[in-house]
Amino acid sequence: MKKLSARRRHPMAAVVVLLLALAATGGLYAAFAPAGKAQADDTAQSLAIDEGKKLYAVGCASCHGVGGQGTSDGPSLTGVGAAAVDFQVGTGRMPAQQPGPQVPKKKVIYDQKEIDQLAAYVASLGPGPSVPSAEQSNPEGADAARGGELFRSNCAQCHNFGGEGGALTNGKYAPRLEGVTPKHMYEAMLTGPQNMPSFPDSTMPEQQKQDIIKYIESVNSDEAANPGGFKLGGIGPVSEGLFSWAIGLSALIALAVWVAAHTAKARKS
């Protein structure tokens, strides 16, 4: 009897067997799912980088160098980040048609998937600002009045008070901001394209960028009031007043000359 009792199973043996069966059939899948998802994300990112490298070799390497190190025709791309690529390529400024003091906005030649792939490759060259999410660049609920104050303090010197743009030195210019998407405005502030200084989140927080975007959209919307009438490009009240005065005065002088000439002719006859 003692020998039979020694062979009797422990009460917890059934529980252990059940757990082993669940593990074998995927019952513990949830514990391993996050690691599997991360691996899938890494694979997708690697594929995007590979495809972006191919696009880069065709459309960008001739100016920026084979490895993004830069050449005499284009700056280094190491550390510029994905946001800079999304802005420059997404607005058609890159690839550039020809070198010059300012690269103009033009028709976009890549679709968004290709832009994302190019951005992934350039981001792999060195850490830099990432593409902002839709939530980050969304100005809904932002303060347009506070954005106007920030814009006049940091941006109006170049872009004009209403975002109409303006001339700079040596053939450079600040582009007009009407019609620019919130994402591209956010990326421009984040990365400082071409002649523009950069405003990282450490200098200008996310909320302030949203306020500025809200202000730009407000003053350039179809519903924006313009009590001053024809704004002449928004160059300012002094300049606009001087322009109107000069045109008006010239018209009065021309009218006076015409009246005097016809009066003298009438007297002779």
Image (cartoon, helix red, strand yellow):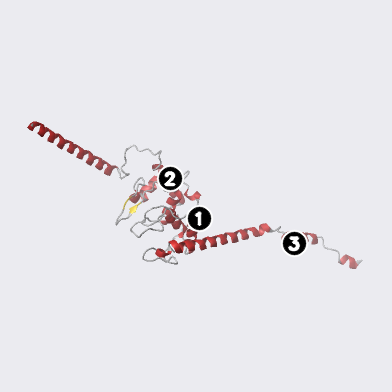
Q: Residue at x 13, y 34 (%)?
A: 262
| Amino acid type, residue under disc 1 in the picture | Lys
The residue where tag 3 is placed is 20
Q: Residue furthest right?
A: 1
Residue drawn at x 52%, y 60% as measured from the top left: 48
Measure the alpha-carbon separation of dots 3 and 1.
45 Å
Residue 154 vertical placement versus 126 (above, below): above
Spatial CA span between label 2 and label 3: 59 Å
Image quarter where the N terminus lies is bottom right
Q: Is residue 113 above or below residue 232?
A: below
Q: Which of marks 1 and 2 is nearer the N terminus?
A: 1
Label 1 sits on residue: 113
Relative depth, front residue between 168 and 50: 50
In-front residue for pair 58/163: 58
Q: Kindly report which numbered mark, 3 or 1, lies closer to the viewer in this rendering.
A: 1
Residue that numbered label 2 is attached to: 214
Earlier residue among tags 2 and 3 = 3
Residue type, mark 2 in image:
Lys
Q: Quadrant of the C terminus?
A: top left
Figure quadrant of residue 64: bottom left
Q: What element carries label 1?
A: helix
Q: Residues within 10 Å of mark 3 (few under 14, many from 20)?
A: few
- Report x, y in % for residue 82: 47, 58
Picture residue at 28% right of the left edge, 42% below the top: 240
Reply above or below: 115 against 147.
Answer: below
Q: Where is residue 122 in the image (x, y as percent from the top left)?
A: 47, 62
Separation of marks 1 and 2 at Cα, in angstroms: 28 Å
Question: Which residue of the protein is positioned furthest toward the front in this rendering?
Answer: 269
Q: Is mark 2 on a helix, strand or loop?
A: helix
How packed mark 2 is, by other alpha carbons closer than 10 Å (few <14, some 14-19, many 20 or more), is: many
Asked whether disc 2 touches disc 3, contact meaning CB atoms under 8 Å apart, the reply is: no
